[in-house]
Image (tube, rainbow, N blue to C red):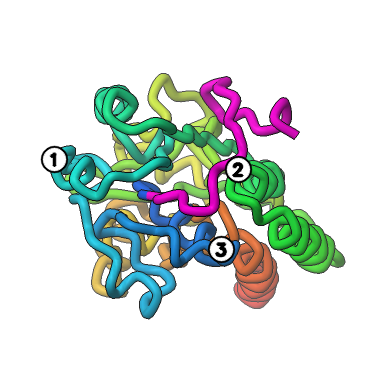
Amino acid sequence: MTGALVDAAGLAHERAADDARIVSLVPSLTELVCDLGLGDRLVGRTGFCIHPRETLRAVPKVGGTKDVDLAKLEALAPTHVIVNVDENRREDAEAIARIVPHVIVTHPLAPDDNPGLYRLFGGIFGREDEAQMLSARYAEARERALDGVMPNAARVLYLIWREPWMSISRDTYISRMLGMFGWDTLPAESAERYPEVDLAALGRDVDRVLLSTEPFPFRETHLAEAAAISGRPAELIDGEMVSWYGSRAIRGLDYLAAFTRRDARDRRAAG
């Protein structure tokens, strides 16, 4: 079992003691920790860790994903801290590793990496049965979501930020999640995983612009602006459903299947 408990940094982890104290610095994985039945072991979180609300209400915050308060974190005396390559700064992870016995590094790059995350956390924290159940639910959701969904064959610009406009590269979890349903994200090539983009120029090459509800809180009021600059239809998309790996991905698959079917109907109607 120990040999299988290897994180994204290549570090092997032993099974934790029953009194493990967990701090999660990754919102979607905080939710996964709770869905594995480990909410009572969670002693710290970021301000962006908001699901499940009732469970997290009493869990102390240690700053944000990019501005962790190391003093607050250390005072909580965690045995394990969960970090992510994209969400957290490397220098923070390295500093935490000097004061906390175990740092679990994650870096899922595709939806099908999720069962591996379930098994990793389940193995470390003694929740193998719960992890197996989540994996089964993921497999069922994947089959259900992709059953009968024709490839969308739409080129999209997925926006995650405004001022400056920022998007995603194809080397991201988000792009691959969309790609499962035939959404082809642009830019096609990027040196940055989350590049700044010229909305007007790139708009000429896409069929539509998707405004994610996170990390920038895009709302209906931003749609007209994005459409006017890009010259393409713009619509909101639930960022949690598309970008949150972990247990949320199970619901995300169903969400994207419905989103894709609706988009296909709308395009046929527009004709």
Ranked by sequence position, the earlier of labels 3 and 2 is 2
Ranked by sequence position, the earlier of labels 3 and 1 is 1
Report the side of 118 relative to 70 (left or right). Answer: right
Q: Is residue 184 magenta?
A: no
x, y percent for residue 260: 65, 66
| Label 2 sits on residue | 124
Q: Secondary structure at mark 2?
A: helix
CA distance for labels 2 and 1:
25 Å
Task: Please tell me in which quadrant of the rendered image residue 69 appears.
Answer: top left
Tell me the magenta residue range: 1-22
- Magenta: main secondary structure: loop
CA distance for labels 3 and 1:
30 Å
For the residues labelled 2 and 1, say whether their Cβ atoms are less than 8 Å apart: no
Task: Point out the image quarter for the C terminus.
Answer: bottom right
| Label 3 sits on residue | 248
Q: Residue at x 69, y 46 (%)?
A: 119
Mark 3 neighbour class, 10 Å CA radius: few under 14, some 14 to 19, many 20 or more: many
Ranked by sequence position, the earlier of labels 2 and 1 is 1
